[in-house]
Image (cartoon, grey):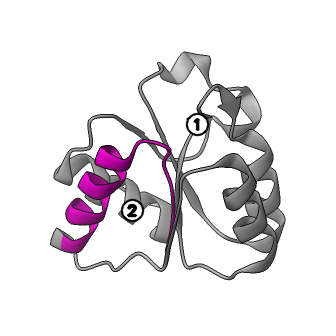
Amino acid sequence: MLIVEDNYLLASTLIDVLAELGYTPVDCEGSFRGAMAAAETATYELAVVEVNLKGESAFPILDKLRPRGIPYILATCDARADIPAIYSSAPFIRKPYDVEQLRKAIIECTSGQA
């Protein structure tokens, strides 16, 4: 699993929440550059991607994951309405992370149903 989160404390919280759900993150990237490199080369069963990485849009990262068939969950403080239409069908979680909200998003992302 790939985690893309630029805030160390939120990334740690997300790792803890995922552990509660039985998932072990494989890679945790906090920068746009690192996340792009990971999205281009590594294989993941799932990615949780913060939409705004220190002011830089993470949408190009999603553009790398999508053709490789890697499902992703959008994580943000923004409203769903702020997400471009091309990405709006992806599961969406609001920060701060909630175990139940994340569980539902993972189910939706991996099986197509919530």
The circle on residue 106 is 2
Q: Residues within 10 Å of mark 2 (few under 14, many from 20)?
A: many
Gap in Å between the C-alphas at discs 2 and 1?
17 Å
Identify which amino acid the numbered label 1 is placed on.
Answer: Val
Q: Quadrant of residue 94?
A: top left
**Percent position (x, y) of residue 44?**
60, 79
Report whether 108 appears left or right of 61. left
Residue ID at (70%, 70%): 38
**Placement of 26 over or under 9, stated as above or below:** below
In the rendered image, which residue does mark 1 sit on? 51
Mark closer to the chain start, 2 or 1:
1
* Residue 12 is one of the magenta-drawn residues: yes
**Placement of 50 over or under 48, stated as above or below:** above
Quadrant placement of the C terminus? bottom left
**Placement of 77 over or under 28, stated as above or below:** above
Identify which amino acid the numbered label 2 is placed on.
Answer: Ile
- The residue closer to the viewer here, 88 or 25, is 25
Report whether 26 appears left or right of 34. left
**Percent position (x, y) of residue 10?**
32, 45
**Placement of 97 over or under 48, stated as above or below:** above
> Which label sits in the foreground, 2 or 1?
1
The residues colored magenta run 1-19
Q: Quadrant of residue 37?
A: bottom right
Residue ID at (27%, 59%): 103
Element type at marker 1? loop
* Residue 98 is one of the magenta-drawn residues: no
Count of labels shown? Answer: 2
